[in-house]
Amino acid sequence: MKQEQALQGTLQGSSLHVLLMLVSKILTRSGYGDIQLLGRRLNAQKSRVGGCELLCQTNMGHVPIKVIIKVINDGVRTRMLDEMAGAIDRTGSDFGIVVSTEDLSPKVAKNQGKYGKSRVEVIDGSLFASMLKKFRIGVRQDGSPDYAFFGELENQLERVNEFLSHGRFARGS
């Protein structure tokens, strides 16, 4: 339990882009199929497709499944669930997932069950940390956070953003 709390604390200190990469890896290992980044890489940028950063597309047998994901480094509020329900309807998705680094409050958890037409799921900070541990992403053998792993992701983030912004890496990198 202490290891997951430490891991959750590490997630709370991570940038949005690092969180997106981690969520993408978790969803891939969970069987969500092809994961696409929908354009938002930085906190200041607006998201496309109704405020969602990731899109999962897969098939269950012959039936296509589409899931949209919103990743936040904040607590989940009812307004976010409302926005997700609208985005699910607008995009024709089967359901949506809000991923947070914070734990879900009992009030918001109660409201989550009220969405009938649009299924809204939440991966809160505790579940996020336990999924990383389950899939052995960013953790050491003993289950504690691998701070070097998270640090290197943040270091590489600067190079990736430079490349995506200008089409080339900065000199000296």
Image (cartoon, grey):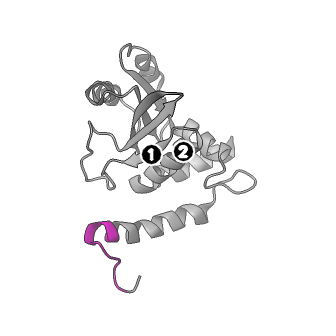
Identify the mark at residue 35; answer none if there is no mark: 1
164 within the magenta span:
yes
Q: CA distance from mark 2 to mark 1?
A: 7 Å
Residue found 32% across the figure and 71% down from its top = 162
Residue found 26% across the figure and 72% down from its top = 166
Vertical position of residue 78 compared to residue 169: above or below: above
Q: Which residues are magenta?
A: 162-171
x%, y% of residue 161?
34, 66
Query: To which quarter of the image does residue 131 belong?
Result: top right
To which residue does mark 2 refer? 28
**Residue 24 falls left or right of residue 172:** right
Residue found 40% across the figure and 18% down from its top = 111
| Residue closest to the eye, 163 or 3 | 163
**Residue 99 falls left or right of residue 28:** left
Q: Quadrant of the C terminus?
A: bottom left
**Residue 117 falls left or right of residue 132:** left
Query: To which quarter of the image does residue 163 belong?
Result: bottom left
**Residue 48 falls left or right of residue 67:** left
